[in-house]
């Protein structure tokens, strides 16, 4: 099933953009999706929403509003959804290395080995921060370029 989702959603740029947008919004109408993504017509937004509904990634209620069903597949395995934010999982490693760097920097005079530990934690912080930025750039834009 996961490989089907990767082909059907992640492989189609606009369908993936609609899914990412709904992950951030939690729910939305065809018109809201059309406006947010700058689609030329509501029909285009409806096409992608229906495709997501058929794949079980969104549910449509009585009022015609679509509610997201969060699933981790493809590149989304590298991310965590926190409210309206979609952040790379590596952000937690950045937090760990940041804490270590601060701790070793504060206690650097305690022992000479803290200098080595500080250097290693700074390197880890730089590498993990770089990867976090790279992962974040993988996600397609969900804001309209016409705004």
Image (spheres, rainbow, N blue to C red):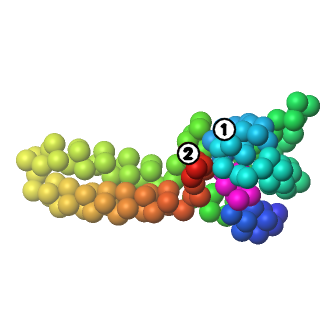
**Residue shown at the point (20%, 48%) measured from the top left:** 104
Q: Quadrant of the C terminus?
A: top right
Which residue is denoted by mark 2 in the rendering?
147
Q: Nearer the viewer, residue 135 or 11?
A: 11
* 137 relative to 28 in the view: left or right: left
The alpha-carbon separation of the residues under discs 1 and 2 comes to: 18 Å
Closer to the observer: label 1 or label 2? 2
Which residue is denoted by mark 1 in the rendering?
25
Magenta segment, which residues? 14-20
Query: How many C-alpha atoms fall within 10 Å of the one at disc 2: few (<14), some, or many (≥20)?
Result: few
Q: Secondary structure at mark 2?
A: loop
**Residue shown at the point (68%, 63%) measured from the top left:** 13
Q: Secondary structure at mark 1?
A: helix
Above or below, comparing residue 104 to residue 115 in the picture = above
**Residue shown at the point (9%, 56%) measured from the top left:** 112
Measuring from the top left, give residue 17's x and y in whole percent. Answer: 67, 55
Q: Please, what is the dominant secondary structure of the magenta stretch? A: helix
Q: Quadrant of the N terminus?
A: bottom right
Magenta stretch: includes residue 15: yes
**Residue shown at the point (82%, 35%) measured from the top left:** 65
Measuring from the top left, give residue 25's x and y in whole percent. Answer: 66, 38
* 116 relative to 50 in the view: left or right: left
Above or below, comparing residue 1 to residue 141 in the picture = below
């Amino acid at each position: 099933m996961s490989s089907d989702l990767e082909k059907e959603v992640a492989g189609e740029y606009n369908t993936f953009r609609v899914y990412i947008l709904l992950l951030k919004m939690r729910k939305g109408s065809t018109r809201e999706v059309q406006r947010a993504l700058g689609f030329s017509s509501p029909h285009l937004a409806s096409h992608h929403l229906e495709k997501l509904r058929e794949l079980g990634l969104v549910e449509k209620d009585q009022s015609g509003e679509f509610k997201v069903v969060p699933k981790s597949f493809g590149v989304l395995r590298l991310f965590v959804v926190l409210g309206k934010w979609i952040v790379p999982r590596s952000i937690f490693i950045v937090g760990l290395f940041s804490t270590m760097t601060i701790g070793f920097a504060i206690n650097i005079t305690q022992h000479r080995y803290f200098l080595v530990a500080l250097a290693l934690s700074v390197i880890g912080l730089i590498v993990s921060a770089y990867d976090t930025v790279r992962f974040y750039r993988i996600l397609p834009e969900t804001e309209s370029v016409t705004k």
